[in-house]
Amino acid sequence: MTPIPDFIVEMRELIGHHPLWLPGVTAVITRGDGHVLLVKRSDNGAWTPVTGIVDPGEEPAIAAAREALEETGVVIRVDRLAATTVLPELTYDNGDRAAYLDITFACTWLSGEAYVADDESTDVRWWPIDDLPPMSPHMMSRMEAGLSDEVEARFVGKHVAEQGPVTLHPSSPVFGVTSCSSGWVGVLLGPEGRPTVHVAGTIADLVELVRETSDPELVQVFEGGHLTREDLLAKGLTAPAWFAGAGFTEDDLLDACAAACVAASHV
């Protein structure tokens, strides 16, 4: 039976069978000749890499090296973080509940003859990497991560940040416009992707103001304005240009118009 660390015994006296969140380490130890070190657990007879619980305040890599020495008598070098995994909550025979965060390291044997160094295992053996004994799926996944030549660690359920809006760069300027209490407001988006806001008392003045620096294509007119799309086109704007961009659409441009309209009405 694997001994329970003293700090867990003390916590159990305080919280009883309530679930504990515990960090653990797995050391996948190789020695450069195509072999990996495994232990046969005394509690269930399964072959596994060296595993253990991180003591309070202990660095996980140091815990991996400590567990290797305590369980097998070998000195190792911890090379890299190979994987992190959260294991499902376990309920032990005595009713204790716990969930573990496993931190798997790829390690290299440095010195020492491997032997059964404590009562957590009944056998210790170097196994050929291409002829491993049967293991549980979650244990095999740790082995695969530790034996791979990957540089980055594996993260189960790795978070992928949401992509923010991508600025649209239209091939020619586009123009969204609406009426407001101050007259007319429009947002012009040029090929450089930087919007500019224009405000004028009349639509004719707005069009003239914009045409001083650009020859935009009309996107849309907000309904409710006293001029229609056809009215604006008649003022000299070119044919409508419908466009879409990742994270920046026609509606976004019109929303900018509305925001500018509100701002203009408070000037």
Image: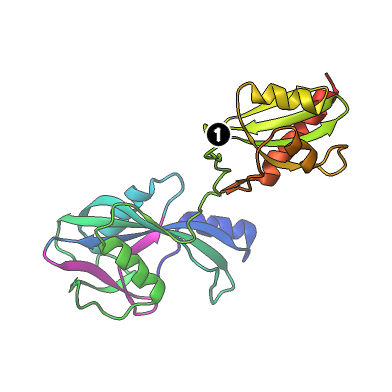
51 in the magenta segment: yes
Q: How is the image coloured?
A: rainbow
Considering depth in this image, is 150 or 19 the residue closer to the camera?
A: 150
Please, what is the three-letter code of the amino acid marked with disc 1?
A: Gly
Q: Residue furthest left?
A: 33
Image height of 104 relative to 267, above or below:
below
Relative to 263, 249 lies left or right: left
Quadrant where the C terminus is found in the figure:
top right
Dot 1 alpha-carbon crowd within 10 angstroms: few under 14, some 14 to 19, many 20 or more: some
Considering depth in this image, is 113 or 89 the residue closer to the camera?
A: 89
Image height of 129 relative to 238, above or below:
below
Residue 163 seen by the camera: yes
Instruction: State the count of labels.
Output: 1
Residue for point 25% across, 63% down: 147
**Residue 217 location, x and y as percent?**
64, 38
Residue for point 11% across, 65% down: 33
Q: Main secondary structure of the magenta part?
A: strand
Relative to 163, 37 lies left or right: left
Considering depth in this image, is 15 or 77 the residue closer to the camera?
A: 77
Write the start and end of the magenta stretch as one range.
Answer: 33-53
**Residue 70 location, x and y as percent?**
28, 58
The residue that label 1 is drawn on is: 193
Which image quarter: residue 259?
top right
Image height of 136 relative to 98, above or below:
below
